[in-house]
Image (spheres, grey):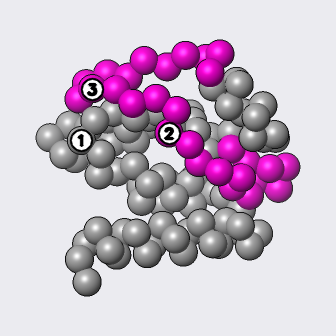
């Protein structure tokens, strides 16, 4: 099994768990969720994880994609996406692709 296949299966498991009632209740669970989702990107991305009132994932959405060193984020589009998802809470994260070692800022 290739690394990509393993990551794809892990993402499917995380998505299934989030739909079955598992909540993102700790910084570690958020970090693990995001690490699998955006860590291997060669460019910067801004992702929003929309949550219900029990902090279960409604969906995760890559709202903006940038270049190797920057991403433009438009607050109006973030608010529109959160309202469309009917989210009670949101987690915002931005990856930083530096020499293929990705750092993730969570807001």
Q: Picture quarter containing residue 96?
A: top left
Q: CA distance from mark 3 to mark 2?
A: 14 Å
Q: Is residue 62 magenta?
A: yes
Relative to 94, 79 lies left or right: right
Query: Crowdedness of circle 2 by 10 Å Cα count: few (<14), some, many (20+)?
Result: some
Disc number placed over residue 62 in the picture, else none: 2
Q: Earlier in the sequence, mark 3 or mark 2?
A: 2
**Going from the N terminus, do you reach mark 2 or mark 1 first?**
1
Q: Is residue 85 above or below residue 54?
A: above
Q: Give the quadrant of the N terminus.
A: bottom left
Q: Which residue is mark 3?
A: 67
Q: Which residue is mark 1?
A: 42
Distance Cα–Cα, label 2 vs label 1: 14 Å
User: From this viewpoint, which residue is outermost toward the front?
Assistant: 84
- Tell me: 103 left or right of 79: left
Q: Is residue 33 above or below residue 50?
A: below
Identify whether 66 is placed above or below 76. Answer: below
Q: Which residues are magenta?
A: 50-77
- Mark positioned earlier in the residue sequence (1 or 3): 1
Residue 8 lies in the magenta stretch: no
Determine if residue 89 is in view. Answer: no
Q: Are marks 3 and 2 in contact (CB under 8 Å)?
A: no
Foreground: 89 or 2? Answer: 2
Residue 55: x and y in percent read 76, 53
Q: CA distance from mark 1 to mark 3?
A: 8 Å
Where disc 2 sits, the SS reads: strand
Residue 71, x across and y down, in percent: 38, 22
Pinpoint residue 80: horizontal percent, then vertical percent: 71, 25
Crowd rating for badge 1 (residues with CA inside 10 Å; few <14, some 14–19, many 20+): some
Q: Image check: 84 left or right of 77?
A: right
């Amino acid at each position: 099994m290739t690394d990509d296949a393993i990551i794809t299966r892990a993402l499917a498991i995380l998505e299934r768990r989030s739909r079955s009632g598992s909540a993102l209740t700790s910084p570690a669970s958020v970090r693990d969720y995001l690490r699998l989702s955006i860590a291997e990107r060669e460019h910067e991305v801004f992702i929003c994880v929309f949550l219900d009132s029990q902090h279960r994932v409604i969906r995760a959405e890559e709202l903006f994609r940038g270049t190797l060193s920057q991403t433009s984020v438009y607050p109006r589009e973030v608010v529109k996406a959160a309202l469309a998802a009917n989210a009670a809470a949101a987690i915002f994260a931005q990856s930083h692709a530096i020499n293929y070692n990705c750092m993730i800022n969570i807001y």
